[in-house]
Amino acid sequence: FDLLAASARGPWRTLAKQAAFALLYCFVHSTMHLLRVCLLNVAINTSSSAVFLIIVTNNFGEIKSTVFKKYSDESLFPIITSDIVERFYVVFDVLIVLVRRSVSVRVGAYSWFDILQWLGMLVVIEVGTDWVKFFLIFKFSDMKASTLEVYKEVLIADLLLC
């Protein structure tokens, strides 16, 4: 009977530890997203040069950390998928800032046109940085463009099979 009781307690403790870890991870992940949205919101409401500074430093670090390495077909796939997720986050953050601004009672120092111009430039620079990064990675790693077709098929299969 003691063996049965001990084996029944084990999975519950493991499950409780995993659930606590998952909750902690979700909290940290959500806090990071909230901080990024707050940073973007403050940068938009503060000055236009702050948004440009954030864009340039983020993209320069991204290019510097990935371009000058040799990649194989298998090692490049996680980088491409992380860039897809990053683009989704940028668009989602922009939408949150626009919704927050639309429900705000106080009118900021900048017009909607100025804000949309900066947010559009943010998205265009992010996508442009990714294009330049992958052009250079493909050139330095002597990879063929047909590799992207394989990646596209894998991503479509993942999307349809999930």
Image (spheres, helix red, strand yellow):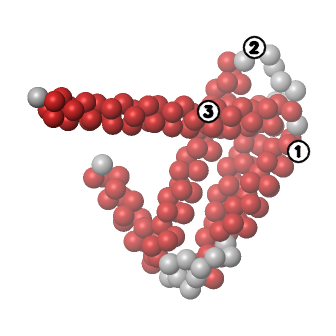
Q: Tell me how far mark 3 sits from mark 1, CA to CA.
A: 25 Å
Q: Residues within 10 Å of mark 2 (few under 14, many from 20)?
A: few
Q: Residue at x 64, y 57 (%)?
A: 127
The residue type indicated by label 3 comes to: Thr
Which residue was labeled with disc 1?
49
Q: Left or right of 29: which side holds 110?
A: right
Q: Residue at x 57, y 57 (%)?
A: 83
> Is residue 159 depicted above or below 89 in this figure?
below
* Rendering coords of residue 158 (x, y %): 34, 56
* Rendering coords of residue 38 (x, y %): 72, 32
Q: Nearer the viewer, residue 42 or 105?
A: 42
Asked whether the beta carbons under mark 3 and mark 2 sit within 8 Å of each other, the answer is no
* Rendering coords of residue 80 (x, y %): 52, 63
Q: Residue at x 63, y 76 (%)?
A: 69
Task: Mark 1 or mark 2: name the one nearer the start of the chain.
Answer: 1
Which residue was labeled with disc 2?
105
